[in-house]
Amino acid sequence: MTSENEAILNDEISTSIGAGVGVADGVQPDGGAGTATQASAKAASDVPAVKATGVHKAFGGLHVLKGIDMTVEPGTVTVILGPSGSGKSTFLRLINQLETITAGSIEINGELIGFKHVNKGGRDVLQTLNDREIGRQRAELGMVFQRFNLFPHRTALQNVMEAPVHVAKTPKAKARAEAMAQLERVGMADRANYYPMQLSGGQQQRVAIARALAMHPKIMLFDEPTSALDPELVGEVLGVMRTLADAGMTMIVVTHEIGFAREVADQVVFMDGGVVVERGSSSIIDHPAEPRFQDFLSNVL
Amino acid sequence: MCRRNGVTVYMYGGRAARLQGEGSMTRRNQSDGLDIPGRIKARPVHRPGSLVAGIIVALLALMLVDGMVTNKQFDWPIVWKYLFNEHVLNGIGWTLVLTVTSMLIAIVLAIVLAVMRKSVNAVLRGVSWFWIWFFRGTPIYTQLVFWGLFAVLVPKLTLGVPFTDIHFWQMDTAQLNKVIAPGFLAAMIGLALNESAYLAEIVRAGLEAVDPGQAEAAQALGMPHSMIMRRVVLPQAMRIIVPPTGNEVISMLKTTSLVSAVPFSLELQFATDAISHRIYKPIPLLIVACIWYLVITSVLMVVQAWLERYFGKGFNASRAADTVEGLRTDGHASFDDDVKKKAEHVGFLGLNA
Ligand SMILES: Nc1ncnc2c1ncn2[C@@H]1O[C@H](COP(=O)(O)OP(=O)(O)OP(=O)(O)O)[C@@H](O)[C@H]1O
Ligand SMILES: [Mg+2]
């Protein structure tokens, strides 16, 4: 399964996972860092929004992702399905650099994330990016969490304004107007001055989406955005996501909402045990080829 | 029968209170404004034991007050005479200055220590651990004596390149003793360093109580670490940090009475002691000191209540019933905790008002 890992990162990274882990087998020091270099030489509009190549992740001795390849084209919606523990959240968190990648590479709009290639004495080595550079790369991405993670000590409006004012340094008045527009977009403008605890789960999640949108991300990541919601609140959040997709937002969505996947997804990816088992257009949901995917669907539907 | 009704009433009352975010679980059924037909009005269970106990305790309290008023040794005229004595008022001033300054230094140190304690750098973690171990592990009195002797231990302070003879600046440590008032710096530093060790543990507990998802969400929005600490984690940790810190301030107020160990001789306890030695009446002046400590403590309690309300913003807000589930999954303090806290809060304000 690791045969196609041309862009596995060098030993500097793989050593951090300790010797006993299987990933080490797949590591080719100085192997083919070429892929990333070529891609970062700003190609035109046909550059994928997200390109993951041979992505591995290990936590201590636990090998969670075992060589994930994935390409997400701009303006498309990718839905990741998979049983619990298959590594879906871990993959999203790697894209957003909330975890450090163990091996492989991820490019956002053609730019390698987390590292840069530097020339050290004629040798091409990887250098970890500093906080500011990582912050700039994260600005391309918005993330929505399963448990909302709104700031409880700030109102809905303040939650949405927080990053524009303090990270992007937008003037307050302008940020407020824009934040209100985002709240309007998710249908929460009338609750702008409520604290998160005064809102229902579905309302909180819609505010969380507005908060992520306020930084004008090019790609939105959703990690089971409706799993913590009561059934009757799921629809309002999926509705907002559908509108976003229709507006051409690039989205990667981890969800168990098969109906949403069938209706909205341009690409469906089924993961199990840290590998991609099956992928294709949304039609694979109705005609799964792999037995494991068939099993999963029959359990979910 | 009667008892079963009692329970039913209680549950109605509790439920209604919950839905309105009222907080206390008392029988508020008469004042909840709900129009429920057939509301049960049952007589409460008689508890003669508690009535008897109440009477006994009240009698004892009365005897105590009577004893204090009639006992000549208390010498109330002397108490009134010295309550607003100039030296006493001066002493209060110095006690407050010592409390506030050493507490402020301690808070800053404690935040630094708590952050160091969670650092990835082993040296920083080790230093923080050692600091807390040392200052918590030795008596404050000993530490104050030590700071008083600092000038003997380190006669000269120099600023230069370590382990060489190069220095840019130096001074006699004994001169520091004269800054502001004799012994003030030693007293302030002694109190502050000791306190920082206790506060560091309080701050650490507060930081650890904040849901890690909060920092993650902030990270995902592109915030740098320092900003996440300042704008997301610390404000939420404050909710947990403030109540025990209030206790620490009150405890610090009284610990200042130990700075005679330095020696620093201007604060309240020392001032009242000095007068009592002069007029050979120790008890009334002890009472003077007690009265003032109590007055200041009461003021501090009001400030604490205000701070708790400020940092509870967003947590104490009244909420619709359907968010209770969201509360639990969100990893914040459970509803019942909040209710309990609030009940305390209410009682507390009542006490002061
Ligand atoms: N920080 C961590 N440290 C150690 N192990 C982790 C960590 N994060 C995730 N894991 C492990 O990685 C595996 C994959 O977790 P992940 O959360 O990615 O699964 P998932 O597909 O999102 O599952 P679910 O549908 O339950 O959310 C799990 O076995 C989990 O225990
Ligand atoms: Mg998950």
Image (spheres, coloured by chain):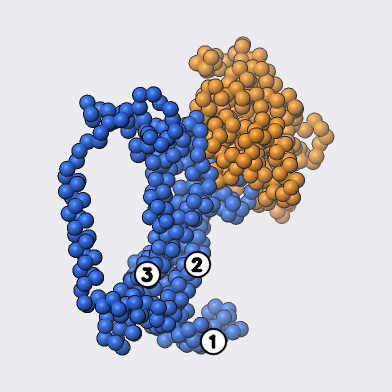
* Tint applied to chain B in the drawing: blue
| Amino acid beneath label 2 | Leu
Query: How far across and down, in percent of the image, does residue B156 sit?
Result: 50, 86
Q: The residue marked by circle 3 belongs to what chain?
A: B
| Amino acid beneath label 1 | Met
What distance separates the C-alpha of mark 2 from that of mark 1?
26 Å
Sooner in the amino-acid sequence: mark 2 or mark 1: 2
Q: The residue marked by circle 2 belongs to what chain?
A: B
Total labels: the figure holds 3
Query: How far across and down, in percent of the image, does residue B210 sit?
Result: 49, 47
Query: How far across and down, in percent of the image, does residue B73 sit?
Result: 22, 77
Residue where numbered disc 2 is placed: B104
- Which chain has been coloured orange in this picture? A
Q: Is residue B148 left or right of residue B48?
A: right
Q: Nearer the viewer, mark 3 or mark 2?
A: 3
Q: Is residue B127 left or right of residue B29?
A: right
Task: Look at the numbered discs 3 and 2 and tell me whether their residues touch, using CB distance below 8 Å.
Answer: no
Sooner in the amino-acid sequence: mark 3 or mark 2: 2
Residue name at image x 42 percent, y 72 percent: B191
Residue name at image x 40 percent, y 52 percent: B350
Q: Nearer the viewer, mark 3 or mark 1?
A: 3
| Amino acid beneath label 3 | Tyr
Position of residue B120 relative to residue B106, above or below, is above
Residue where numbered disc 3 is placed: B293
Classify mark 1 as within 8 Å of ligand 1 or not, answering yes or no. no
Instruction: Name the quarter where the C terminus of chain B is drawn.
Output: bottom left
Residue where numbered disc 1 is placed: B171
Q: Is residue B148 left or right of residue B175?
A: left
What distance separates the C-alpha of mark 3 from that of mark 2?
20 Å
Q: Nearer the viewer, residue B1 or B321?
A: B1
